[in-house]
Amino acid sequence: MSKDNITIAEARKYISENYGAPRHDVSLLVRACRNTAKENEGFEPRDIFHLVIENLPIGNATHSYGFHTAMGRHLIESTINYYEDLKLIKIWMQR
């Protein structure tokens, strides 16, 4: 794994240490971050993870004067949409 990618184990450990037991499916969150990064050149899954979890800026691309830029909103919304789609697929596959 590259330093810019994030593993499920790393994400689970990070969330658990900083926020307690995860309330969402961490593996789907990581996959959603990877999909968003793949779709948006110049962004890494680890950075998107921290943007979504902690609202940390990614350079100057995601925040301006403390507010989300259009790119920041796009990355967050894309990650959420991927997560929700993956969650629905997982539910459907369990039937």
Image (spheres, rainbow, N blue to C red):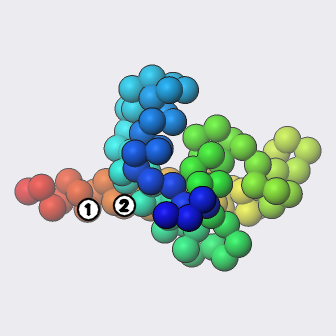
Residue at 15% over, 61% down: 93
The picture quadrant where one finds residue 9 is top left
Q: Is residue 70 left or right of residue 82?
A: right
Q: Is residue 63 above or below residue 31?
A: above
Where's residue 49, x and y in %?
Answer: 57, 50
Q: In front: 77, or 7?
A: 7
Is residue 81 among what the camera can see?
no
Residue at 68% over, 41% down: 55
Say what amino acid the circle numbered 2 marks.
Asp
Q: Which residue is mark 1?
A: 89
Q: Which residue is mark 2?
A: 85
Where's residue 65, x and y in %?
Answer: 91, 44
Distance between mark 1 and mark 2 Cα atoms? 6 Å
Q: Is residue 76 left or right of residue 10?
A: right
Mark 2 crowd level (few <14, some 14–19, many ≥20, 10 Å Cα):
some
Residue at the far left in the pictured view: 95
Residue at 59% over, 54% down: 46
Please say if the residues under marks 1 and 2 sit with CB atoms less than 8 Å apart.
Answer: yes
Q: Secondary structure at mark 2?
A: helix
Q: In front: 51, or 92?
A: 51
Residue at the far top in the pictured view: 20
Say what amino acid the circle numbered 1 marks.
Ile
In this rendering, the count of numbered labels is: 2
Mark 1 crowd level (few <14, some 14–19, many ≥20, 10 Å Cα):
few
Residue at 61% over, 61% down: 4
